[in-house]
Image (cartoon, rainbow, N blue to C red):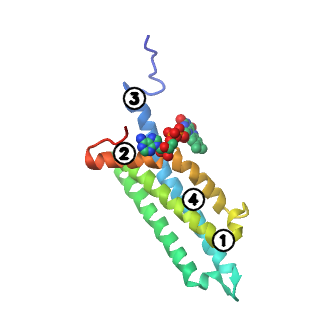
């Protein structure tokens, strides 16, 4: 017997309904990980300006500045990607595959930013005194949940080629 579920997912006739909930969660992740990455970048920037080695702040070394520039570029690219997906979503034009690309790309970016920031903080990067390790740990979960990196890659690959490589 079919159980009426109009109060839970009104108008839904198929798996399309529950799957649309996953799209919403994944779209949220596209934004959320930009915030995590930004927090890691800001912690690394602040730390690099105060931590002294060889008589200077580590921010004055070119290698540190390269890391800061890479992190800032990653955060800004991730923000712009999320913003564009939001525009498409508001216009009712966003596709599942675009959300897959956004989730995959921004989680990758945030994971890389967290790892770089952790390095800038040296040994302090592995402590919970700074926010970086907490974000890095959380991002490892986000890499796997709401569709693993691999499955979103296959989703994008299918959209590009028309061929499913899932099985
Ligand atoms: C913190 C956390 C919270 C979670 N919360 C929830 C939740 O609330 N609800 C829920 O339902 N689930 C939840 N999950 C589960 C999550 O969705 C699954 O862990 C995820 O889907 C991967 O499934 P699995 O762990 O069984 O890995 P597997 O499916 O065994 O995959 C292992 C590896 O193989 C890869 N792989 C699998 N198939 C292919 C393929 N065809 N081609 C290439 N690579 C492939 C995967 O990408 C992964 O890297 C959560 C997971 C975590 C870590």
Evaluate if marks 2 and 1 touch, with contact meaning CB atoms under 8 Å apart. no
Is the residue 79 above or below the residue 159 in the image? below
Say the numbered circle drawn on residue 87.
none
Examine the rendering and report whether any part of residue 93 can be seen: no
Q: Name the residue that disc number 4 marks.
A: 36
The quarter of the picture where the C terminus appears is top left
* First of labels 3, 2 by sequence position: 3
Q: Mark 4: which secondary structure?
A: helix
Q: Mark 2 and 4 residues: CB-CB less than 8 Å, in contact?
A: no
> Against 160, is 46 above or below?
below
- Residue occupied by mark 1: 121
For disc 3, the neighbor class at 10 Å (few under 14, some 14 to 19, many from 20) is few
Residue that appears at 65% across and 57% down? 134
Of marks 2 and 4, the one in the foreground: 2
Determine whether the residue tagged by mark 1 lies in a helix, strand or loop. Answer: loop
Give the camera-side residue of 155 and 79.
155
Disc 1 residue lies near ligand 1 with CB under 8 A: no
- How far apart marks 1 and 4 lie (CA) works out to 16 Å
How far is mark 2 from mark 1, CA to CA?
36 Å
State which quarter of the image contains the N terminus.
Answer: top left
Taking the view exactly as shown, the residue that stands out farthest to the front is 167
Q: Earlier in the sequence, mark 2 or mark 4?
A: 4
- Give the residue number, with chain letter if any, for mark 3: 15
Sequence-earlier tag: 2 or 1: 1
Residue density around tag 1, few if under 14, some if 14–19, many if 20 or more, within 10 Å: many
- 164 to 37, vertically: above or below: above
Residue 101 drawn at (x, y percent):
39, 52
C-alpha span from label 3 to label 2: 17 Å
Describe the element under mark 3 as helix, strand or loop. Answer: loop
């Amino acid at each position: 017997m079919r159980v009426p579920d109009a109060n839970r997912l009104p108008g839904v006739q198929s798996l399309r309904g529950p799957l649309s909930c996953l799209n919403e969660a994944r779209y949220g992740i596209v934004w959320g990980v930009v915030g995590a990455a930004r927090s890691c970048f800001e912690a690394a920037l602040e730390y690099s300006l105060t931590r002294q080695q060889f008589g200077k702040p580590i921010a004055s070394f070119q290698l540190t500045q390269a890391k800061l520039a890479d992190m800032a570029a990653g955060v800004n690219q991730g923000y712009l990607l999320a913003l564009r997906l939001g525009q498409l979503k508001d216009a009712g034009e966003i596709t599942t595959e675009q959300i897959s690309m956004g989730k995959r790309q921004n989680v990758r970016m945030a994971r890389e930013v967290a790892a770089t920031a952790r390095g800038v903080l040296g040994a302090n990067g592995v402590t919970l005194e700074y926010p970086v390790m907490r974000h890095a740990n959380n991002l490892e979960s986000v890499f796997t949940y709401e569709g693993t990196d691999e499955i979103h890659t296959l989703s994008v690959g299918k959209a590009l080629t028309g061929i499913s490589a899932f099985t």
